[in-house]
Image (cartoon, rainbow, N blue to C red):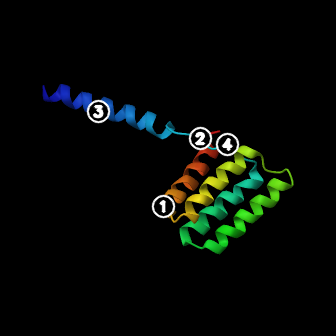
Amino acid sequence: MIRSTNNRLASLLLILIVLVPGCGPTFPQVSFDHLRYIGSLQTAINTRQILWLHRTAAAIETDRKAGRIGDEEHAAYQAIVRLAEGGQWASAEAQCVRFKRDQLRQ
């Protein structure tokens, strides 16, 4: 009985390890040049530097207006910026990490 329960727990754990990282929305694929924005956002968020955050957001906006950043990519950056501006630093950091990870998967 104990061995059967252990096997079930191990199977459940394996399923969770495989499925959970892929849950939730994924971030759009960005060009190599735009990876710097993810890094800049993450640095600003890690250090809680609102000025750096706004400078990065302004640079993103400049590229968007020039047509170098699409709507989906822009929305992803803006969501992270809004979290940080709202004081949700940990959530913003987690989204930066997820954004980076999604770039490696695609």
Residue ID at (21%, 32%): 6
Pointers 1 and 3 in contact (CB under 8 A)? no
> Of tags 2 and 3, which is closer to the observer?
2
- Residue under label 1: 90
> Of tags 4 and 3, which is closer to the observer?
4
> CA gap, disc 4 to disc 2?
7 Å
Q: Sequence order check: which comes first, mark 4 or mark 1?
A: 4
- Residue under label 3: 10
Spot occupied by residue 28 in the image (x, y as percentages of width and height): 67, 42
Give the residue type that dot 3 points to.
Answer: Ala
> What's the mark number on residue 26?
2
Mark 4: secondary structure: loop
Q: Sequence order check: which comes first, mark 4 or mark 3?
A: 3
Q: Residues within 10 Å of mark 4 (few under 14, many from 20)?
A: some
> CA gap, disc 1 to disc 3?
31 Å
Give the residue type that dot 4 points to.
Answer: Pro
Give the residue type that dot 1 points to.
Answer: Ala
Pointers 4 and 3 in contact (CB under 8 A)? no
Direction from residue 63 to residue 77 in the image, left or right:
left
- Residue under label 4: 28
